[in-house]
Amino acid sequence: MSSCSTSQGPTRFGSVCSPPCSSTLSQMYNMLDTAAEQIMVHKDFQAAFDTCERGLESLGSLEQEDSRCGEFKAGFCILGIQALAELNKWHCVLSWVLQQYEHQDKIPAKIMQMCILLYSKVGEPGVIQEATRDWLHCPSNSRVSAFGTVAELYLLHVLVPLGHTDEARELIAGDVGNSAFTEDQRQTALDVVEEKEQQIREPPPNPGCSPNSEVPAHTVSTQGVVVHKLGAMLRFLYRKLLMTSSGSFPLRRIFLLTVLLYMLFARMDPALPSSFMWISKLLDLLRQMWRKMFAPYYQILT
């Protein structure tokens, strides 16, 4: 599912984990590399997800003291998230990640970033809100190098789109905000929140006064029928125009051209969005008329 893919592309295993030592870790390395190849080369997303599932199951039997197990686990989860997104199963991502890590505050920062971007991309930022809030308020996560990035993504892609400006201000000015944002970032974030608050306070524009206001559905359908009839009429007039061949500068052509110019500039308001399609059709027709009327004789013959 291209519309639900995260901004990070699939990465080869070497960029996720350090080189393996034991034979078991070497097997994990190969499985992770296979999953990445299935996503990038073969576009077999279900096979890639199944490979990630097998890899995560195998990791459960390894020594938890080995720090590289965490790297492998994060690598399998990253590729698994991408595979689920491509399979249009994005709604399963958060529950699947929680199944692997059990607690929200244990999820690595780079996976939290992917989840925020994914759910924001599909228009469901509220799904990830609670999990991200708990993650940010976990004291151990505040020492992670990517903590500020997670807080920034949470502010821009979750709180602001949802209109939760009070929580956004707490994030910026509170204990979490002091450790997540620099002074310049804090001021920029406040400007974004204030702009959102202004949009919420402003009443919707009057449909009769604003040229950008929404047009009712029945009006749009009526305009579509009128445009269709206008196009049919213009094509009919154009065929009649081509059949006219009296004189070097036929009076009938001048008359039709005058009528079209009157419809274009006198009877339509170019500022109205509903007239854009009419103007486009008329301009195309006028170009064709101009070429037929004033083209050199050798172009007319051809």
Image (spheres, rainbow, N blue to C red):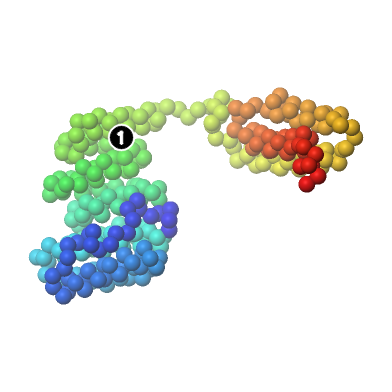
Residue in the picture at 12% in, 62% down: 67
The residue lying furthest to the left in this view is: 65
Say whether residue 95 is visible: no
Binning the other alpha carbons within 10 Å of mark 1 as few (below 14), some (14 to 19) or many (20 upward) gives some
Is residue 256 visible in the rendered structure shown here? yes
What residue is shown with label 1? 165
Considering every residue shown, the one lying at the far bottom of the view is 23
Task: Please tell me which residue is depicted at 29% across the width and 47% down the height of the picture.
Answer: 129
Residue most extreme to the right: 246
Quadrant occupied by the N terminus: bottom left
Which residue lies most toward the front here?
Answer: 298
Q: Position of residue 144 (x, y in %)?
A: 15, 48
Which quadrant of the figure has residue 53?
bottom left
Near-viewer residue (5 or 214): 5
Instruction: Determine whether 44 is above or below 265 in the image.
Output: below
Q: What percent of the width, then of the height, locates residue 238? A: 79, 40
Q: Is residue 100 above or below residue 155?
A: below
Q: Nearer the viewer, residue 289 or 190?
A: 289
In this view of the protein, which residue sits in the foreground, 207 or 51?
Answer: 51
Q: Is residue 235 above or below residue 108?
A: above
The residue positioned 15% from the left and 45% from the top of the image is 142
Q: Is residue 165 left or right of residue 300?
A: left
Q: Is residue 83 above or below residue 197?
A: below
Give residue 233's position: percent from left, percent from top: 78, 40
Amino acid tagged 1? Thr
Determine whether the residue tagged by mark 1 lies in a helix, strand or loop: helix
User: Is residue 166 or residue 8 the one in the foreground?
Assistant: 8
Left or right: residue 179 compared with residue 48:
left
The count of marks equals 1
Residue at point 28%, 43% (across, down): 154
